[in-house]
Image (spheres, rainbow, N blue to C red):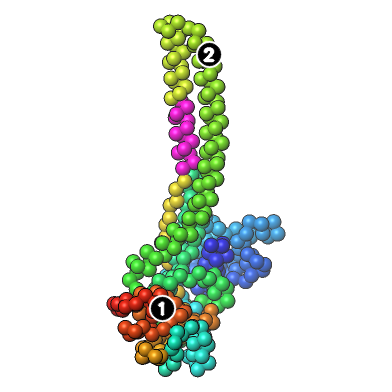
Amino acid sequence: MSERGGVEAFTVAALELLGGVAEPQAPGLYTVLWPDPGAGEPAVRQLAFDPELMDEAPDAELVSFASPALEHLLQQATASGRVARAYLHAGANASRSTAERLARAYRFLESAWTPQHGRPWWVPAGVFLFRVRYLSDALEEDLVEVAVTLTDGRLLRRLGEVLDRHALVAEPLEAWPMMAERPAGETYAGARHELEQRLLAPLGLRRRELESRLGRESGRAQGYYAELIREREEPRAALPPDSPERVQVDSKLLAIRREREGRLAELHAKYRLSADVSLLSVLRLYLPRVVFTGTLAGTRGRAELTLGWDPIAQTGEPARCSRCDGLTYEVGLHRGGGAACPRCLDGGDRSPRRP
Protein backbone atom coordinates (compact mmCIF):
# COMPACT_ATOMS: atom_id res chain seq x y z
CA MET A 1 0.00 0.00 0.00
CA SER A 2 1.26 3.45 -0.82
CA GLU A 3 1.92 6.02 1.85
CA ARG A 4 -0.75 8.21 0.21
CA GLY A 5 -3.36 5.54 0.75
CA GLY A 6 -2.35 5.05 4.38
CA VAL A 7 -0.65 7.74 6.42
CA GLU A 8 -1.59 10.74 4.29
CA ALA A 9 -5.22 9.79 3.60
CA PHE A 10 -5.80 8.75 7.19
CA THR A 11 -4.24 11.96 8.57
CA VAL A 12 -6.25 14.26 6.30
CA ALA A 13 -9.50 12.41 6.99
CA ALA A 14 -8.90 12.42 10.74
CA LEU A 15 -8.06 16.13 10.75
CA GLU A 16 -11.25 16.99 8.89
CA LEU A 17 -13.39 14.83 11.16
CA LEU A 18 -11.90 16.51 14.21
CA GLY A 19 -12.90 19.91 12.83
CA GLY A 20 -9.59 20.84 11.21
CA VAL A 21 -8.85 21.93 7.66
CA ALA A 22 -6.14 20.52 5.38
CA GLU A 23 -5.27 22.60 2.31
CA PRO A 24 -2.91 20.93 -0.19
CA GLN A 25 -0.01 23.15 -1.25
CA ALA A 26 1.73 20.54 -3.38
CA PRO A 27 1.56 16.75 -3.71
CA GLY A 28 2.26 15.48 -0.19
CA LEU A 29 2.42 18.96 1.37
CA TYR A 30 -0.43 20.59 3.35
CA THR A 31 -1.14 23.69 5.35
CA VAL A 32 -3.57 22.70 8.10
CA LEU A 33 -5.67 24.29 10.77
CA TRP A 34 -4.98 21.81 13.55
CA PRO A 35 -7.86 21.50 16.03
CA ASP A 36 -6.72 21.96 19.62
CA PRO A 37 -9.57 21.56 22.13
CA GLY A 38 -7.38 22.80 24.99
CA ALA A 39 -6.33 26.05 23.32
CA GLY A 40 -9.73 26.81 21.86
CA GLU A 41 -8.31 28.17 18.59
CA PRO A 42 -6.89 25.87 15.90
CA ALA A 43 -3.15 26.11 15.26
CA VAL A 44 -1.72 26.67 11.77
CA ARG A 45 0.79 23.96 10.89
CA GLN A 46 2.43 22.62 7.77
CA LEU A 47 2.57 18.86 7.22
CA ALA A 48 4.73 16.98 4.73
CA PHE A 49 4.33 13.30 3.83
CA ASP A 50 7.47 12.97 1.72
CA PRO A 51 11.00 13.50 3.14
CA GLU A 52 12.11 15.05 -0.15
CA LEU A 53 9.71 17.95 0.45
CA MET A 54 11.60 19.05 3.57
CA ASP A 55 14.17 20.96 1.48
CA GLU A 56 11.54 23.24 -0.03
CA ALA A 57 9.46 23.41 3.15
CA PRO A 58 11.98 23.25 6.04
CA ASP A 59 9.39 24.41 8.61
CA ALA A 60 6.98 21.58 7.79
CA GLU A 61 6.50 18.60 10.11
CA LEU A 62 7.27 15.28 8.46
CA VAL A 63 4.36 12.92 9.12
CA SER A 64 5.14 9.21 9.08
CA PHE A 65 4.24 6.12 11.06
CA ALA A 66 6.39 7.18 14.04
CA SER A 67 6.00 10.96 13.92
CA PRO A 68 4.75 12.92 16.95
CA ALA A 69 2.16 14.66 14.75
CA LEU A 70 0.46 11.39 13.83
CA GLU A 71 0.69 10.09 17.40
CA HIS A 72 -0.90 13.32 18.67
CA LEU A 73 -3.65 13.09 16.07
CA LEU A 74 -4.40 9.49 17.00
CA GLN A 75 -4.60 10.44 20.66
CA GLN A 76 -7.05 13.25 19.85
CA ALA A 77 -9.06 10.92 17.65
CA THR A 78 -9.28 8.27 20.35
CA ALA A 79 -10.23 10.83 22.99
CA SER A 80 -12.92 12.45 20.85
CA GLY A 81 -14.37 9.24 19.49
CA ARG A 82 -15.34 11.04 16.29
CA VAL A 83 -12.93 9.17 14.05
CA ALA A 84 -14.52 5.90 15.10
CA ARG A 85 -17.43 6.64 12.73
CA ALA A 86 -17.75 8.58 9.48
CA TYR A 87 -20.07 8.77 6.50
CA LEU A 88 -18.94 9.20 2.93
CA HIS A 89 -20.65 12.21 1.43
CA ALA A 90 -21.80 11.07 -2.03
CA GLY A 91 -25.15 10.97 -3.80
CA ALA A 92 -27.11 7.79 -4.52
CA ASN A 93 -29.91 7.81 -7.08
CA ALA A 94 -32.34 4.89 -7.45
CA SER A 95 -33.54 6.01 -10.87
CA ARG A 96 -34.50 3.98 -13.90
CA SER A 97 -31.31 5.03 -15.69
CA THR A 98 -29.30 3.75 -12.72
CA ALA A 99 -31.11 0.41 -12.94
CA GLU A 100 -30.36 0.21 -16.66
CA ARG A 101 -26.67 0.93 -16.08
CA LEU A 102 -26.66 -1.66 -13.31
CA ALA A 103 -28.10 -4.34 -15.60
CA ARG A 104 -25.38 -3.67 -18.18
CA ALA A 105 -22.72 -4.55 -15.61
CA TYR A 106 -23.69 -8.25 -15.74
CA ARG A 107 -23.93 -11.05 -18.25
CA PHE A 108 -27.21 -12.87 -17.76
CA LEU A 109 -26.97 -16.42 -19.08
CA GLU A 110 -30.08 -17.50 -21.05
CA SER A 111 -32.10 -15.17 -18.88
CA ALA A 112 -33.05 -11.53 -18.36
CA TRP A 113 -33.20 -9.42 -15.23
CA THR A 114 -36.05 -6.99 -14.59
CA PRO A 115 -35.59 -4.46 -11.77
CA GLN A 116 -38.63 -3.86 -9.60
CA HIS A 117 -37.64 -1.52 -6.79
CA GLY A 118 -34.54 0.40 -5.80
CA ARG A 119 -33.49 2.45 -2.83
CA PRO A 120 -30.27 3.77 -1.29
CA TRP A 121 -28.69 2.04 1.70
CA TRP A 122 -25.72 2.64 3.94
CA VAL A 123 -23.11 -0.12 3.71
CA PRO A 124 -20.88 -0.26 6.80
CA ALA A 125 -17.19 -0.80 6.20
CA GLY A 126 -14.27 -1.23 8.55
CA VAL A 127 -10.99 0.56 7.85
CA PHE A 128 -8.35 -1.21 9.92
CA LEU A 129 -5.07 0.64 10.35
CA PHE A 130 -2.28 -1.76 11.32
CA ARG A 131 1.20 -0.89 12.49
CA VAL A 132 3.77 -3.41 11.29
CA ARG A 133 7.19 -3.60 12.90
CA TYR A 134 9.90 -5.49 10.99
CA LEU A 135 12.39 -6.74 13.56
CA SER A 136 15.92 -7.79 12.60
CA ASP A 137 19.27 -6.03 13.00
CA ALA A 138 17.31 -2.78 12.65
CA LEU A 139 13.74 -1.78 13.44
CA GLU A 140 11.54 -0.71 10.53
CA GLU A 141 7.90 0.28 10.80
CA ASP A 142 5.07 0.72 8.35
CA LEU A 143 1.36 1.47 8.35
CA VAL A 144 -0.94 -0.81 6.40
CA GLU A 145 -4.57 0.06 5.84
CA VAL A 146 -7.10 -2.69 5.11
CA ALA A 147 -10.68 -1.78 4.31
CA VAL A 148 -13.47 -4.36 4.10
CA THR A 149 -17.23 -4.18 3.99
CA LEU A 150 -18.80 -5.34 7.24
CA THR A 151 -21.73 -6.88 5.39
CA ASP A 152 -19.90 -9.55 3.40
CA GLY A 153 -16.19 -8.98 4.03
CA ARG A 154 -15.37 -7.77 0.52
CA LEU A 155 -12.10 -5.86 0.20
CA LEU A 156 -12.18 -2.17 -0.69
CA ARG A 157 -8.85 -1.93 -2.47
CA ARG A 158 -9.10 1.64 -3.76
CA LEU A 159 -10.34 3.43 -0.68
CA GLY A 160 -7.52 5.97 -0.78
CA GLU A 161 -8.74 7.20 -4.18
CA VAL A 162 -12.30 7.37 -2.86
CA LEU A 163 -11.24 9.51 0.10
CA ASP A 164 -9.44 11.84 -2.28
CA ARG A 165 -12.64 12.51 -4.22
CA HIS A 166 -15.31 12.57 -1.51
CA ALA A 167 -15.67 14.28 1.84
CA LEU A 168 -16.25 12.50 5.13
CA VAL A 169 -18.88 13.75 7.55
CA ALA A 170 -19.47 12.80 11.16
CA GLU A 171 -23.25 12.43 10.80
CA PRO A 172 -25.31 11.08 7.89
CA LEU A 173 -26.87 13.63 5.59
CA GLU A 174 -29.42 11.06 4.40
CA ALA A 175 -31.66 8.87 6.57
CA TRP A 176 -31.07 5.70 4.59
CA PRO A 177 -31.48 2.24 6.13
CA MET A 178 -28.38 0.40 7.30
CA MET A 179 -27.36 -2.99 5.93
CA ALA A 180 -26.90 -5.80 8.43
CA GLU A 181 -23.35 -6.61 9.51
CA ARG A 182 -21.49 -9.86 9.87
CA PRO A 183 -20.00 -10.72 13.27
CA ALA A 184 -17.07 -8.45 14.05
CA GLY A 185 -14.72 -11.39 14.57
CA GLU A 186 -15.28 -12.63 11.01
CA THR A 187 -14.61 -9.20 9.56
CA TYR A 188 -11.43 -8.69 11.57
CA ALA A 189 -10.20 -12.16 10.64
CA GLY A 190 -10.69 -11.29 6.97
CA ALA A 191 -8.78 -8.04 7.41
CA ARG A 192 -5.91 -9.84 9.15
CA HIS A 193 -5.78 -12.44 6.37
CA GLU A 194 -5.55 -9.68 3.75
CA LEU A 195 -2.82 -8.00 5.81
CA GLU A 196 -0.83 -11.23 5.94
CA GLN A 197 -1.11 -11.60 2.17
CA ARG A 198 0.12 -8.04 1.64
CA LEU A 199 3.09 -8.64 3.93
CA LEU A 200 4.34 -11.63 1.94
CA ALA A 201 6.14 -9.48 -0.64
CA PRO A 202 7.84 -6.99 1.75
CA LEU A 203 8.76 -9.82 4.12
CA GLY A 204 10.22 -11.83 1.25
CA LEU A 205 12.23 -8.85 0.02
CA ARG A 206 13.59 -8.06 3.48
CA ARG A 207 14.36 -11.72 4.12
CA ARG A 208 16.35 -12.00 0.89
CA GLU A 209 18.28 -8.84 1.74
CA LEU A 210 19.05 -10.14 5.23
CA GLU A 211 20.09 -13.55 3.91
CA SER A 212 22.46 -11.85 1.48
CA ARG A 213 24.01 -9.76 4.27
CA LEU A 214 24.16 -12.81 6.52
CA GLY A 215 25.96 -14.74 3.79
CA ARG A 216 28.56 -11.99 3.37
CA GLU A 217 29.22 -11.54 7.09
CA SER A 218 29.21 -15.27 7.76
CA GLY A 219 31.68 -15.75 4.92
CA ARG A 220 34.00 -13.12 6.39
CA ALA A 221 33.70 -14.68 9.84
CA GLN A 222 34.35 -18.17 8.48
CA GLY A 223 37.42 -16.90 6.65
CA TYR A 224 38.71 -15.08 9.72
CA TYR A 225 38.40 -18.11 11.97
CA ALA A 226 39.70 -20.47 9.29
CA GLU A 227 42.87 -18.39 9.15
CA LEU A 228 43.23 -18.45 12.95
CA ILE A 229 42.83 -22.23 12.97
CA ARG A 230 45.30 -22.69 10.08
CA GLU A 231 47.91 -20.56 11.85
CA ARG A 232 47.76 -22.89 14.86
CA GLU A 233 47.30 -26.24 13.14
CA GLU A 234 50.40 -25.92 10.96
CA PRO A 235 52.91 -25.79 13.86
CA ARG A 236 50.76 -28.24 15.88
CA ALA A 237 51.59 -31.06 13.47
CA ALA A 238 55.25 -30.86 14.46
CA LEU A 239 54.60 -31.09 18.22
CA PRO A 240 54.70 -34.40 20.13
CA PRO A 241 51.17 -35.73 20.84
CA ASP A 242 51.41 -35.54 24.64
CA SER A 243 53.55 -32.46 24.93
CA PRO A 244 52.32 -29.50 27.02
CA GLU A 245 52.74 -27.27 23.98
CA ARG A 246 50.40 -29.41 21.88
CA VAL A 247 47.82 -29.57 24.69
CA GLN A 248 47.97 -25.77 24.88
CA VAL A 249 47.46 -25.46 21.11
CA ASP A 250 44.54 -27.92 21.20
CA SER A 251 42.94 -25.90 23.97
CA LYS A 252 43.36 -22.74 21.94
CA LEU A 253 41.90 -24.41 18.84
CA LEU A 254 38.88 -25.57 20.83
CA ALA A 255 38.36 -22.04 22.13
CA ILE A 256 38.58 -20.63 18.57
CA ARG A 257 36.04 -23.13 17.24
CA ARG A 258 33.65 -22.36 20.10
CA GLU A 259 34.08 -18.66 19.48
CA ARG A 260 33.42 -19.24 15.78
CA GLU A 261 30.18 -21.13 16.49
CA GLY A 262 29.08 -18.42 18.89
CA ARG A 263 29.81 -15.70 16.35
CA LEU A 264 27.89 -17.53 13.61
CA ALA A 265 24.93 -18.05 15.95
CA GLU A 266 25.08 -14.37 16.82
CA LEU A 267 24.97 -13.42 13.15
CA HIS A 268 22.00 -15.72 12.47
CA ALA A 269 20.14 -14.14 15.39
CA LYS A 270 21.06 -10.64 14.19
CA TYR A 271 19.65 -11.23 10.72
CA ARG A 272 16.62 -13.27 11.75
CA LEU A 273 13.46 -11.48 10.56
CA SER A 274 10.15 -11.29 12.36
CA ALA A 275 7.11 -9.04 12.03
CA ASP A 276 5.10 -7.67 14.91
CA VAL A 277 1.60 -6.49 13.99
CA SER A 278 -0.69 -4.34 16.12
CA LEU A 279 -4.05 -2.79 15.36
CA LEU A 280 -3.62 0.96 15.62
CA SER A 281 -7.14 2.17 14.97
CA VAL A 282 -10.44 1.28 13.33
CA LEU A 283 -12.58 3.65 11.33
CA ARG A 284 -16.20 2.60 10.84
CA LEU A 285 -17.00 4.08 7.45
CA TYR A 286 -20.50 4.11 5.95
CA LEU A 287 -20.68 4.02 2.16
CA PRO A 288 -23.70 4.73 -0.05
CA ARG A 289 -25.14 1.91 -2.15
CA VAL A 290 -28.28 1.61 -4.28
CA VAL A 291 -29.95 -1.78 -3.96
CA PHE A 292 -32.40 -2.99 -6.61
CA THR A 293 -34.67 -5.96 -6.09
CA GLY A 294 -35.65 -7.71 -9.29
CA THR A 295 -36.58 -10.90 -11.07
CA LEU A 296 -34.32 -13.11 -13.16
CA ALA A 297 -36.45 -14.96 -15.76
CA GLY A 298 -35.54 -17.51 -18.42
CA THR A 299 -36.31 -20.93 -19.82
CA ARG A 300 -35.69 -22.52 -16.42
CA GLY A 301 -38.22 -20.34 -14.64
CA ARG A 302 -37.86 -17.32 -12.42
CA ALA A 303 -35.92 -16.31 -9.33
CA GLU A 304 -35.54 -13.23 -7.21
CA LEU A 305 -32.19 -11.51 -7.69
CA THR A 306 -31.05 -8.46 -5.73
CA LEU A 307 -28.24 -6.40 -7.23
CA GLY A 308 -26.28 -3.46 -5.86
CA TRP A 309 -25.01 -0.31 -7.55
CA ASP A 310 -21.93 1.46 -6.24
CA PRO A 311 -22.49 5.18 -6.91
CA ILE A 312 -18.85 5.98 -6.04
CA ALA A 313 -17.23 3.56 -8.48
CA GLN A 314 -20.19 3.93 -10.87
CA THR A 315 -20.49 0.19 -11.36
CA GLY A 316 -22.51 -2.78 -10.24
CA GLU A 317 -21.35 -4.92 -7.35
CA PRO A 318 -20.88 -8.64 -8.02
CA ALA A 319 -23.96 -10.80 -7.56
CA ARG A 320 -23.92 -13.60 -5.01
CA CYS A 321 -24.45 -17.15 -6.22
CA SER A 322 -27.28 -18.90 -4.38
CA ARG A 323 -25.41 -22.22 -4.62
CA CYS A 324 -21.77 -21.60 -3.67
CA ASP A 325 -22.06 -18.13 -2.10
CA GLY A 326 -19.42 -16.89 -4.52
CA LEU A 327 -19.38 -13.49 -6.21
CA THR A 328 -19.91 -13.19 -9.95
CA TYR A 329 -20.86 -10.88 -12.80
CA GLU A 330 -22.25 -13.80 -14.83
CA VAL A 331 -25.60 -15.08 -13.60
CA GLY A 332 -28.07 -17.68 -14.79
CA LEU A 333 -30.98 -19.74 -13.47
CA HIS A 334 -30.06 -23.03 -11.84
CA ARG A 335 -32.34 -25.97 -12.64
CA GLY A 336 -32.70 -26.55 -8.92
CA GLY A 337 -33.85 -22.98 -8.38
CA GLY A 338 -32.18 -19.67 -7.68
CA ALA A 339 -29.61 -17.55 -9.46
CA ALA A 340 -26.19 -19.16 -9.87
CA CYS A 341 -22.73 -18.53 -11.24
CA PRO A 342 -21.43 -20.33 -14.38
CA ARG A 343 -19.44 -22.86 -12.35
CA CYS A 344 -22.51 -23.98 -10.44
CA LEU A 345 -24.63 -23.96 -13.58
CA ASP A 346 -22.14 -26.33 -15.22
CA GLY A 347 -21.47 -28.35 -12.10
CA GLY A 348 -24.91 -29.83 -11.62
CA ASP A 349 -27.11 -30.10 -8.57
CA ARG A 350 -25.18 -28.28 -5.90
CA SER A 351 -27.46 -27.62 -2.94
CA PRO A 352 -28.48 -24.02 -2.30
CA ARG A 353 -26.48 -22.30 0.41
CA ARG A 354 -28.07 -21.96 3.81
CA PRO A 355 -28.96 -18.41 4.83
Work out whether 286 lies above or below 189.
Answer: below
Q: Quadrant of the C terminus?
A: bottom left
Q: Residue 117, located in which quarter of the rendered image?
A: bottom left
Residue 276 location (% of width, % of height) = 43, 52
Q: Position of residue 282 (x, y in %)?
A: 43, 67
Task: Pinpoint residue 102: horizontal percent, then vertical percent.
Answer: 50, 86
Report if residue 288 is visible in the image: no
**137 and 220: which is toward the camera:** 220
Judged from this view, the residue extending furthest toward the right is: 56
Label 1, label 2: how far apart the Cα atoms are: 77 Å
Tell me which corner region of the image, top left, top right, bottom left or bottom right, holds residue 349: bottom left
Q: Nearer the viewer, mark 1 or mark 2?
A: 1
Circle 1 Cα neighbour tier, 10 Å, few/some/many (<14 / 14–19 / ≥20): many
44 or 164: nearer the eye? Answer: 164
Q: SS of the residue at dot 2?
A: helix
Prevailing SS of the magenta stretch: helix
**Vertical placement of 211 versus 238: above or below?**
below
Q: Residue at x 53, y 50 (%)?
A: 205
Give the residue at x 52% y 71%: 159
Q: Please give the residue where the numbered disc 2 appears in the rendered image.
A: 234
Range of magenta residues: 259-272
Q: Earlier in the sequence, mark 1 or mark 2?
A: 2
Q: Nearer the viewer, residue 24 or 179?
A: 179
Using the image, determine if residue 269 lies above or below residue 59: above
Residue 29 is at least partly visible in this image: yes
- Answer whether residue 271 is magenta in the image: yes
Q: Amino acid at mark 1?
A: Cys
- What is the number of the mark on residue 341? 1
**Circle 2 residues within 10 Å: few <14, some 14–19, many ≥20:** few
- Name the residue type under label 2: Glu
Q: Residue at x 52, y 81 (%)?
A: 315
Task: Judge whether 171 appears above or below 236 on screen.
Answer: below
